[in-house]
Amino acid sequence: MGCHNSKVCGQVSRKKKKNKVQGDEKHIKDIRLQDGSGTHSSEENLLETYECQLKILHAVLTASGDQERDQLLKDHPGDICTLVHSIIEKVKTEITADLNDLHEKQMRSTLERHQSATEELQRLHGEEKNVLNESHAAAENALKDQIEGLTSELKLFSELKRRAQESTLKRDLQRNIETHGSPGAFWEQEQESLLFVIEMKRERLQDQGNKLLQMETLVEKNLSLEDQLLQALQQSEDYRVRIDNYQSLIHAIKTLLCSLCLGQDYLFVQPMAGIIAILFENVSSTCSISEILQGFYEVSIWQ
């Protein structure tokens, strides 16, 4: 380290400035004594007094720290020093107010960005939920139409089966009649008709079996869609709880910052925006509000 940065050099510099200021004051006293004896004119004495005060003011303004500046102002009371002290206090007050305004703007900007992200998340979740509901409703309507069609076909098949049974009974009756005598051509035609009907029924049964398999596949798809809908609803509830946690966190941090900023100085106000950004980056759905606030207290105490 150089001499300018060492503590010994700093003390020597402060002693030199203090001795210089004391010498200027002694010179002012000598001027005043000489003015009483009539050696110098009042204008020269006043000019030298102003020059000495300017030197004192320069020493105060070029002080290396607040402690040295306050010591110079305390050792050399006067109108100029009082004015300088009031100006310094005013500048400190204005700087503090500007820092508070800057911190408030940064906090407001952070909250607005978080609110915008929350609204965007809600919008995307609503759109996804609507798409899932529409697809589920369309699939359900399609399944209902297919089930109605299969039901009507089953009814038709039952009706044909009933007619076939009635035809068999009628044939038995005709056989009993044949025992007592009936034309053979009629029975041959009836047999051919029955064979045709049986073949037609067999084909229809095969078609019905295929359609039943398709219906079972569609039912399985419908159950899968229902499971997906339940998962989407569960995710919706999780997102809603997370959004509520974020809003509670925003309100708690804003209240805590307002209470802390009232009694803090520049050393605490300056890094506050960085602390808030770190908290928002590290927050997750698994963290509770109390854990986040505890972390904020630890960071603020460390600062």
Image (spheres, grey):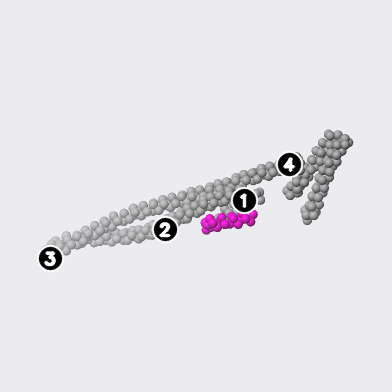
Instruction: Residue under label 4, please give it.
Output: 82
Left or right: residue 94 versus residue 59 is left
The answer to which quarter of the image holds residue 189 is bottom left
The crowding category of the residue bearing disc 3, from other C-alpha atoms within 10 Å (few below 14, some 14 to 19, many at least 20), is: few
User: Mark 3: which amino acid?
Assistant: Thr
Q: Which of marks 2 and 1 is in front?
A: 1
User: Mark 1: which amino acid?
Assistant: Met
Nearest to N terminus: mark 3 or mark 1: 3
Instruction: Residue under label 2, please give it.
Output: 227
Tag 1, which secondary structure? helix
Disc 3 to disc 4, C-alpha distance: 144 Å
Disc 2 to disc 4, C-alpha distance: 79 Å
Residue at 23% in and 61% down? 195
Disc 2 to disc 1, C-alpha distance: 46 Å
Instruction: Residue under label 3, please give it.
Output: 179
The image quadrant where one finds the N terminus is bottom right
The image quadrant where one finds the C terminus is bottom right
The magenta-colored residue range is 285-303
Residue at 31% in and 59% down? 208
